[in-house]
Image (spheres, rainbow, N blue to C red):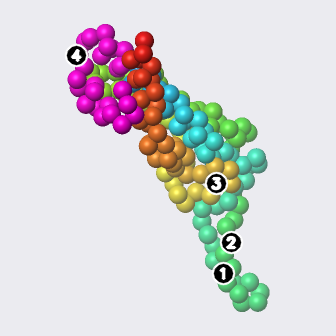
């Protein structure tokens, strides 16, 4: 199979239930699992970490003027409501479920498993001193074009067996 071959057309040409179909499907599931592991590894590096102290910048900005009459913006420090004493809790909560095959659909569920993960991911207005919002979406988008490489590699191995 050449790198330029239409993988979908090849899969449709296989006899469902045949040994070759099963090997190729298993290879695709393995590739999906490996791709998810690759993406979640990058996401862990981007996931925000709590500050090393109990204080954090407020999301509310106060504007005013200083003694010279110049405009100033103040972002007051507030107690961090999510500070746990362990700043890697979000990163440590990364999880990947085993690939699930249903018919010709392969699904891998990957994400972060703490109560504030979605809020930290979606809120672009949060101030992160270490990490960023969209910490899972960013590596997924950046690596989307590589998914075919993962599948092609595993399918070639399955066909060489």
Quadrant placement of the C terminus: top left
Of labels 1 and 4, earlier in sequence is 4
- Between discs 3 and 2, the one toward the N terminus: 2
Could you give the CA–CA distance between mark 4 and mark 3, rounded to whole angstroms? 52 Å
Which residue position is annotated with label 3?
128
Residue assigned mark 1: 64
Spatial CA distance of label 1 from label 3 is 24 Å
| Distance from the alpha carbon under mark 2 to that under mark 1 | 8 Å
Disc 4 crowd, CA 10 A, few/some/many (<14, 14-19, 20+)? few
The residue sitting at 49% across, 43% down in the picture is: 143
Between the C-alphas of marks 3 and 2, the distance is 17 Å
- Which residue is at 46% across, 39% downward? 146
Q: Secondary structure at mark 4?
A: loop
Element on which disc 1 rests: strand
- Could you say which quadrant of the image residue 15 lies in? top left
Q: Residue furthest bottom?
A: 69
Q: Is residue 44 magenta?
A: no
Q: Nearer the viewer, mark 1 or mark 4?
A: 4
Q: Earlier in the sequence, mark 4 or mark 3?
A: 4
Q: CA distance from mark 1 to mark 4?
A: 72 Å
- Vertical placement of 118 versus 154: above or below? below
The answer to whether residue 28 shows anywhere in this view is yes
Decide: is 47 above or below 25: below
Residue position marked by numbered label 2 in the rendering? 74
Q: Give residue 10's position: percent from left, percent from top.
A: 28, 27
100 relative position to 150: left or right: left
**Which badge, 1 or 3, is on the more N-terminal residue?**
1
Q: Nearer the viewer, residue 141 or 131?
A: 141
């Amino acid at each position: 199979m050449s790198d330029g071959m239409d993988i979908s057309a090849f899969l449709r040409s296989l006899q469902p239930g045949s040994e070759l179909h099963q090997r190729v499907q298993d290879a695709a599931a393995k590739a999906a699992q490996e791709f998810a592991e690759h993406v979640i590894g990058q996401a862990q590096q981007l996931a925000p970490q709590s500050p090393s102290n109990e204080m954090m910048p407020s999301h509310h900005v106060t504007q005013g003027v200083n003694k010279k009459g110049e405009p100033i913006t103040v972002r007051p420090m507030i107690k961090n409501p999510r500070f746990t004493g362990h700043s890697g809790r979000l990163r440590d909560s990364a999880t990947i479920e085993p690939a699930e095959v249903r018919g010709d659909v392969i699904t891998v569920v990957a994400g972060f498993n703490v109560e504030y993960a979605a809020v930290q991911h979606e809120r672009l207005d949060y101030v992160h001193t270490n990490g960023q919002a969209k910490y899972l979406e960013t590596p997924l988008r950046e690596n989307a074009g590589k998914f075919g490489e993962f599948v092609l590699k595993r399918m070639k191995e399955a066909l060489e067996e």
